[in-house]
């Protein structure tokens, strides 16, 4: 989420599985969201990442990504680009420091938090009827009744079906005549429940923000990031992942002082 203009409002508000002993050779074909991975400790991998480009949806106020080709194989013998982009572009991480003064920046997050049991909470049915739908405590408890208690160290992802709008930035932002955004997110109460009652490492959404679109106080962000959790926004392909039983692998940003940054997130099981 979070273009620079959002931060003005924020300033006013103020059992994990043993992991894959055979190692992590991820051989998914680049053009496929899902692929089989023979000979590994898991059989399926799903890419949870949208492609970055200058055309992607962005939070209002953020500058579009720019890709400048600097050298080509034909002219220079090798190919390379310069990338200019807002940290919170595409499928990206919100580090705790994004909303919490003195919080961990992305490059300082303990790496073990970037591999976690993945819980996918589906709210796509109610989101189809109400674009301002939120993950509630009742949704989380209903998930646990069906799939068991959220495991220690879990990463909890919201699947709202919003990614169907990804290629249409206007529909993805879904602004009304007053400029208010409308899309699903985590309710403040659900964020507090996950922080206070469960031991999670972070949460993710398939929308622009951990908070639902109309939020003006960003309480879910403040609660989650303020507790040292991280967020992933604009996740893809969550409908292809089982609600329980997968792991998420997050290739997090590692530039100095990172408030966040684009990630390559994968689900494996």
Image: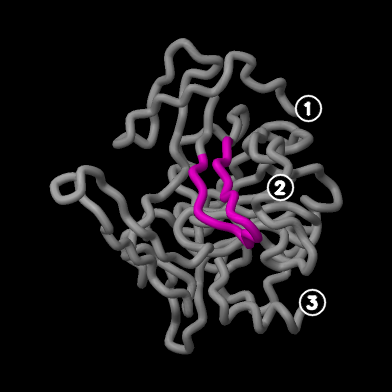
Is 183 situated above or below 267? Answer: below
- Element marked by disc 3: loop
Give the residue displayed 81% in from the left and 42% down from the top: 199
Instruction: State the residue position of label 1.
Output: 15
| 186 within the magenta span | no
Query: Where's residue 106, x and y in %?
Result: 65, 53
First of labels 3, 2 by sequence position? 3
Bounds of the magenta segment? 249-265
Is 24 situated above or below 238? Answer: above
- Element marked by disc 2: loop
Q: In this rendering, which labeled residue sits more in front, label 3 or label 2?
A: 2
Residue 190 seen in render:
no
- Element marked by disc 1: loop
Q: Quadrant of residue 141?
A: top right
Mark 2: give few (<14), some (14-19) or many (20+) Cα within 10 Å: some
Mark 3: give few (<14), some (14-19) or many (20+) Cα within 10 Å: few
Q: Nearer the viewer, residue 184 or 114?
A: 114
Instruction: State the residue position of label 3.
Output: 14
Give the residue displayed 78% in from the left and 69% down from the top: 101
| Image quadrant where one finds the N terminus | bottom right
Query: Where's residue 213, x and y in %?
Result: 55, 71
Instruction: State the residue position of label 2.
Output: 109
Residue 127 seen in render:
yes
Kindly check if marks 3 and 2 are in contact, taking CB atoms under 8 A apart as contact: no
Kindly check if marks 1 and 3 are in contact, taking CB atoms under 8 A apart as contact: no
Colour pattern of the rendering = one colour
First of labels 2, 1 by sequence position? 1
Mark 1: give few (<14), some (14-19) or many (20+) Cα within 10 Å: few
Q: Quadrant of residue 225?
A: bottom right
Give the residue displayed 48% in from the left and 79% down from the top: 61
Q: Which mark is residue 228?
A: none
């Amino acid at each position: 989420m979070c273009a620079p203009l959002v931060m003005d409002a924020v300033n006013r508000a103020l059992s994990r599985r043993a992991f894959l002993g055979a190692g992590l050779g991820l051989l998914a074909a680049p053009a496929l969201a899902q692929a089989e991975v023979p000979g590994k400790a898991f059989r399926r991998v799903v890419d949870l990442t949208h492609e970055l480009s200058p055309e992607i949806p962005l939070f209002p106020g953020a500058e579009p990504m720019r890709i400048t080709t600097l050298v080509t194989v034909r002219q220079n013998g090798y190919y390379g680009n310069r990338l200019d982009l807002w940290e919170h572009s595409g499928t990206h991480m919100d580090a705790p420091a994004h909303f919490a003064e003195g919080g961990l920046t992305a490059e300082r997050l303990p790496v073990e938090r970037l591999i976690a049991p993945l819980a996918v909470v589906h709210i796509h049915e109610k989101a189809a009827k109400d674009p301002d739908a939120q993950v509630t405590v009742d949704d989380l408890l209903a998930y646990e009744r069906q799939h068991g208690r959220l495991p220690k160290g879990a990463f909890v992802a919201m699947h709202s079906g919003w990614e169907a709008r990804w290629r249409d930035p206007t529909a993805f932002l879904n602004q009304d005549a007053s400029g208010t955004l409308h899309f699903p997110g985590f309710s403040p109460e659900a964020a507090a429940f996950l922080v206070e009652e469960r031991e999670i490492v972070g949460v993710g959404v398939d929308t622009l923000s951990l908070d639902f679109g109309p939020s003006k106080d960003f309480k879910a962000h403040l609660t989650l990031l303020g507790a040292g959790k991280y967020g992933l926004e604009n996740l893809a392909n969550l409908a292809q992942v089982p609600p329980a039983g997968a792991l998420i692998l997050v290739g997090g940003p590692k530039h100095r002082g990172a408030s966040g940054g684009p990630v390559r997130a994968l689900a494996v099981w």
